[in-house]
């Protein structure tokens, strides 16, 4: 039996690991020779940022929680590395599987590789070219020390090949976040405030902002919210507030049609997005989900590591200029947004491909 450590730490990791764990469990009956140990770094620890996702997506309780909590990037990375090193020494896995681009991804990949445990990276090869974002550094560092690369797009494959990665180590498998989306679309449910806010399909927008460049400066956040509120043209804008935004938001006068709500559990959040007129965001993962659901998506950033959501999907890079935001929202309201298609391999079967490949790698 081969042991794979699966690392998860922050909210966007949980939808990515869920289908991989389910695929390993399902393949056990086929004598898959694979077992896993789930390690939660504790980067996200609030119930609403972590536990709710485990419950809704039937992710088993972690075998180990490193409980690193909040801190600077260095504090978090250091604590994760110390904790995970102990876990490896205590019980050595045959492989370490990391997903996405958060601090937990990078810190655990480094720790494993230093102890000569091979690293597999799911969502490898994506690049925004924006060094201001900690995620871009995490992606590059992780891919520099990864052995096996599982990718979501042709662009990611090219990025890796251009960086000198041997093609034999790249597996274009699709998107595990979309596995989770497709597996749960018939389970989505309205959030508790749906009736109270008189929300109806297509009568509101959803906004999510949490990137340091958009939310850490109060003036910038205030300008963005005012612009969005005005351009929504009396429609409600539902804004689930990420914990890092709370402090700034308390210092701002919130426009009347912006409705602040808690971070939503997965099934409620997807319901909200699926039925929205449009989504305004600085997230990367949400642009993938809106693409698959065909919901107009305005990204308030200048770059994306997921160009297929713009080229094929419903996403557009709007930046943060108020005039550009207003013009794009007008287009959505007028029903003139592009329709978009679905990127290749985003078919709900990605985790199975990953698990089959992992088994082949480990057995050989
Ligand atoms: C992290 C990821 C980002 C991802 C985001 C999604 C990195 C570098 N960034 O950013 O890519 O899009 O998660 O949510 O890994 N906090 C809480 N409770 C929690 C978690 C965080 O209150 O459960 C607060 C803390 O004050 C913390 C701050 O939020 O300092 C930021 O959390 P952190 O994990 O450092 O980064 P995120 O901004 O959440």
Image (tube, grey):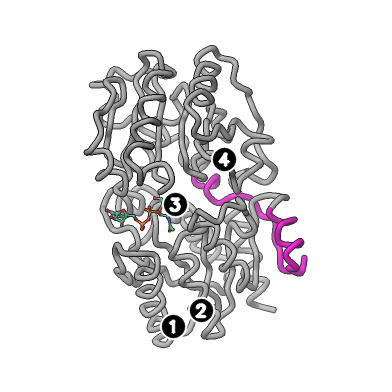
Q: Which residue is mark 2?
A: 112
- Sequence order check, earlier mark of 4 and 2: 2
In the figure, is residue 206 to the left or right of 48?
right
Please indicate, yes or no, whether residue 312 appears anywhere in the rendered image. Answer: yes
In the figure, is residue 95 to the left or right of 213?
right
Foreground tag (1 vs 2): 2
- What is the secondary structure assignment of the residue under circle 3? helix
Asked if residue 163 lies in the magenta stretch, the reply is yes
Checking the image for residue 28, the label placed there is none
Relative image position of residue 255 (x, y in whole percent): 29, 23
Q: Main secondary structure of the magenta part?
A: helix
Foreground tag (4 vs 2): 4
- Sequence order check, earlier mark of 3 and 2: 3
Distance of mark 3 from mark 2, alpha carbons? Answer: 21 Å
Callout 1 touching callout 4 (CB < 8 Å): no
Please indicate, yes or no, whether residue 22 appears anywhere in the rendered image. Answer: no
Relative image position of residue 317 (x, y in whole percent): 58, 35
Checking the image for residue 302, the label placed there is 4
Q: Which residue is mark 1?
A: 88
Relative image position of residue 122 (x, y in whole percent): 58, 60
Crowding near the residue tagged with mark 3, few <14, some 14–19, many ≥20 C-alpha atoms within 10 Å: many
Crowding near the residue tagged with mark 2, few <14, some 14–19, many ≥20 C-alpha atoms within 10 Å: many
Q: State the extent of the magenta-drawn residues as a range.
A: 156-180
Q: Which residue is mark 3?
A: 12
Callout 1 touching callout 2 (CB < 8 Å): yes
Distance of mark 1 from mark 2, alpha carbons? Answer: 8 Å
Residue at x 37% of width, y 22% of height: 229
Some atom of ligand 1 lies within 8 Å of the CB belonging to the residue at label 2? no
Foreground tag (4 vs 3): 4
Crowding near the residue tagged with mark 1, few <14, some 14–19, many ≥20 C-alpha atoms within 10 Å: some
Some atom of ligand 1 lies within 8 Å of the CB belonging to the residue at label 3? yes
Asked if residue 295 lies in the magenta stretch, the reply is no
């Amino acid at each position: 039996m081969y042991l794979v450590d699966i690392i998860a730490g922050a909210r966007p990791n949980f939808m990515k690991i869920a289908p991989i764990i389910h695929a390993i469990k399902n393949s056990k009956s086929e004598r898959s020779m694979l077992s896993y140990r789930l390690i939660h770094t504790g980067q996200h620890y609030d119930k609403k940022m972590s536990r709710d996702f485990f419950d809704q997506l039937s992710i088993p309780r972690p075998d180990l929680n490193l409980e690193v909590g909040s801190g600077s990037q260095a504090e978090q990375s250091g604590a994760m590395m110390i904790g995970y090193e102990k876990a490896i020494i205590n019980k050595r896995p045959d492989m370490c599987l990391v997903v996405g681009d958060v601090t937990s991804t990078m810190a655990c990949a480094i720790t494993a590789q230093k102890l000569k445990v091979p690293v597999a990276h799911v969502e490898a090869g994506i690049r925004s070219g924006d060094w201001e974002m900690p995620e871009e550094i995490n992606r590059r560092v992780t891919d520099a020390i990864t052995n096996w690369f599982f990718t979501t797009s042709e662009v990611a494959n090219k990025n890796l090949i251009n960086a000198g990665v041997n093609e034999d180590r790249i597996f274009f498998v699709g998107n595990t976040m979309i596995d989770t989306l497709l597996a749960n679309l018939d389970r989505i449910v309205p959030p508790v405030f749906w009736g109270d806010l008189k929300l109806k399909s297509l009568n509101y927008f959803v906004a999510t902002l949490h990137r340091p460049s958009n939310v850490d400066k109060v003036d910038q956040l205030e300008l963005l919210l005012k612009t969005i509120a005005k351009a929504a043209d009396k429609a409600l804008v539902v804004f689930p507030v990420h914990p890092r935004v709370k402090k700034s938001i308390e210092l701002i006068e919130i426009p009347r049609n912006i409705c602040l709500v808690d971070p939503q559990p997965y099934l409620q959040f997807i319901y909200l997005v699926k039925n929205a007129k449009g989504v305004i965001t600085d997230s990367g993962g949400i642009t993938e989900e809106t693409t698959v659901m065909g919901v107009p998506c305005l990204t308030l950033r200048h770059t994306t590591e997921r160009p297929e959501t713009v080229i094929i999907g419903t996403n557009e890079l709007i930046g943060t200029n108020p005039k550009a935001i207003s013009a794009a929202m007008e287009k959505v309201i007028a029903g003139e947004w592009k329709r978009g298609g679905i990127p290749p391999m985003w078919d709900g079967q990605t985790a199975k491909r990953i698990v089959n490949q992992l088994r082949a790698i480990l057995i050989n």
